[in-house]
Image: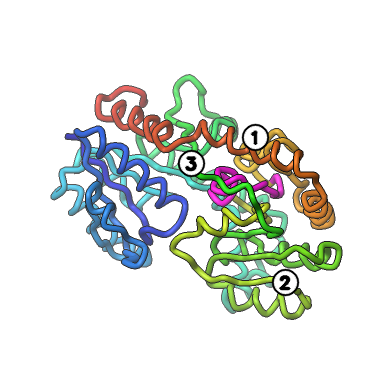
Amino acid sequence: MVRIAFIHNSFPAGGAERVTVDIARYLSGLGGYRVFVYATRISDDMMTEEYAGFMTLRTIPSQAVQSRRAKAVESFVVSDRVDILVQVGKSLPGVDGIRARTGCRTVIACHGEPFWQRYVIMHRRQKGFIRRLMWHLWNRRRFEDGTLALRMAHERTLKDYMLNDAYTVLCESYRREVADALGLDSSLNHLYAIENAEPAVNDICYDKEKVFLFCGRFENWSKRIDRLLRIWSMVQNRLPEWRLVLVGDGPDCGRLKQYAVELGLERISFEGRKRDVTGYYRRASAVCMTSQTEGWPLALTEGQAQGCIGVAFGATSGIVEILSPDGECGFIVQPFDEAQYADVLVKVASMDEASLMKMRADGVRKRSGYTPEVMAEKWKELFDGLVSGQGIE
């Protein structure tokens, strides 16, 4: 029996957590594997009875108290006899000690773009009165062009890479980016590219409504929903029969609603957080994303699987991979040209039915190669290699 534990903050919550569920479900069906989830917050309203059949949940302290969190994780690793510990996002402080004392293998699963930490660094430098003051008095010249933040992100990624037995990224392009930036020998490194899965949809609705859809977390520093609101202000009068629907919640929801009022937006609705968003994808003609940073955005892949056309800024290799070829599987907009984005929405709205159907079918066909079974098998191969001592330095 191979025992695998995943560390999350909230569970279930978003795309990374859905990946864990897919892996656990697949491995449970094979037999010979047991999956644990160590999380700070368990969202009971998002849990299903099915989950209990293929994973075991444990509650751990918040990452705000790192020493307590690490101690709790180590205790569970020992009591659950964990063979492989998967840290989602970043390394657990003290993971090298846990690895040495328990003998478990450790993995970093990067669910963002490579060096995503630079955006967090830039964001936090301007958050709170003291940090804003320091930004203006001392840090501004050091951070304003992002160069220092990127260097710090390289250092953090290299540290995470060196502390663990495997480091996974979301596509082959990302693997090359990390290897090149860190100067890793491509024949020796323990970097692995494993894309996020997307289940096939058997009853796709092609009878779409005139709806542009955003679905995601209302966290503006990364998702930059303010851009989408400004873009809608450019096109709402040009597309009087169309609506913009936003599904989700988060810390910036209130501020973004107020911004929509200030812009005088019409035919826009904020739907809040939904446990099941299938109905929105079934009705929407296109899924819109205006993010500053994304890894392998499930909103785009979920939309494609449901026959929606994806429109996004080509800010990362993951977004480009999902929507490529441009104009066939979706539309990739030059970052971060809001006027061009507005023109693309008008283009989508004016496409004839035959062109729309071809693009929808191309997107569905592309997603069919990323089923949970295919992606979970890649994780299984990684786990089996770690347990046997193969495939790592």
Q: Is residue 27 left or right of residue 376?
A: left
Identify residue for label 3: 202
Please state the horizontal and vertical placement of residue 311, each as a whole percent of the image.
70, 49
Q: Which numbered disc flags the more N-terminal residue, 1 or 3?
A: 3
Please state the horizontal and vertical placement of residue 48, each as a whole percent of the image.
31, 58
Q: Which residues are magenta?
A: 298-314
How crowded is the residue under tag 3: few (<14 C-alpha within 10 Å), some, or many (20+)? few
Q: Is residue 45 left or right of residue 238?
A: left
Give the quarter of the image for residue 42.
bottom left
Give the spatial CA distance, label 3 vs label 2. Answer: 31 Å
Note whether 124 is above or below 25 in the view shown: below
Q: Which numbered disc flags the more N-terminal residue, 2 or 1?
A: 2
Q: Is residue 41 visible?
A: no
- Front-most of residues 68 and 47: 47
Q: Is residue 117 visible?
A: yes
As drawn, which residue projects farthest toward the front? 207
Q: Are marks 3 and 2 in contact (CB under 8 Å)?
A: no
Q: Judging from the image, what secondary structure is the residue with disc 1 in? A: helix
- Front-most of residues 82 and 55: 55
Q: Is residue 301 magenta?
A: yes
Identify residue for label 1: 362
Give the spatial CA distance, label 1 vs label 3. Answer: 16 Å
- Front-most of residues 108 and 144: 108
Identify residue for label 2: 267
Q: Are marks 1 and 3 in contact (CB under 8 Å)?
A: no
